[in-house]
Image (cartoon, rainbow, N blue to C red):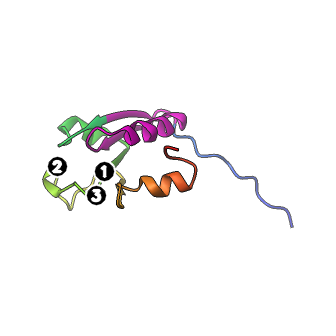
Amino acid sequence: MRLKAFKTPNFRGWKAVILHRPHGDVDHLTCQLERLGMEVAHAWPNLAPEHKAADLILFDANMGHEEQFPWPQSDLPMPMVALIGRRAGWDGLSSAGLGPT
């Protein structure tokens, strides 16, 4: 039985927005997303209407609330990734070798 070759996903040209207050760990996450080929923008405390064109939103679930998004909760225009945890998920990223050291 021959295994299929794994094809690395290509995120080149994707636009990501990180909705998070300024923090050094956000800089590390930005670097990782850029290494995957994404263009990264930052927003806090609210997303702007032009962010609706993003391919991906990463947001701080600890500090976030529905009013930060310029669209109804029932109309999510792109995948949304919640950064959850004591420090918005950074501990998990660090243990996976992706976050700050």
The correct choice, above or below, for 67 with respect to 25 in the image is below
Could you tell me how far apart the alpha carbons at marks 2 and 1 are, in whole angstroms? 10 Å
Checking the image for residue 61, the label placed there is: 3
Give the Cα distance between marks 2 and 3: 11 Å
Q: Position of residue 21 (x, y in %)?
A: 25, 42
Looking at the image, which is closer to me, 63 or 91? 91
Few, some or many residues within 10 Å of mark 2 (<14, 14–19, 20+): some
Q: Earlier in the sequence, mark 2 or mark 3?
A: 3
The structure residue drawn at horizontal position 18% and vertical position 38%, both measured from the top left corner, is: 49
Give the residue at mark 1: 59
Q: Residue at x 13, y 53 (%)?
A: 67
Q: Please, what is the three-letter code of the amino acid marked with disc 1?
A: Phe
| Amino acid on which the number 3 mark rests in the picture | Ala
Q: Secondary structure at mark 2?
A: helix
Residue ID for mark 2: 68
- Image-based side of 90 in relation to 20, left or right: right
Q: Quadrant of residue 24?
A: top left
Q: Is residue 7 magenta?
A: no
Residue density around tag 3, few if under 14, some if 14–19, many if 20 or more, within 10 Å: some
The answer to which image quadrant residue 44 occupies is top left
Q: Residue furthest front?
A: 101
- In contact (CB < 8 Å): disc 2 and disc 1: yes
Q: Tag 2: residue type?
A: Gln
Which element carries disc 3, helix, strand or loop?
loop
Q: Quadrant of the N terminus?
A: bottom right
Q: Is residue 6 left or right of residue 37?
A: right
Q: Is residue 26 left or right of residue 19?
A: right
Do the numbered discs 1 and 3 sit on residues whose CB atoms are within 8 Å?
yes
The percent position of residue 20, horizontal first and vertical second, equals 28, 44
As measured in the structure, the alpha-carbon distance from the residue carrying label 1 to the one carrying label 3 is 6 Å
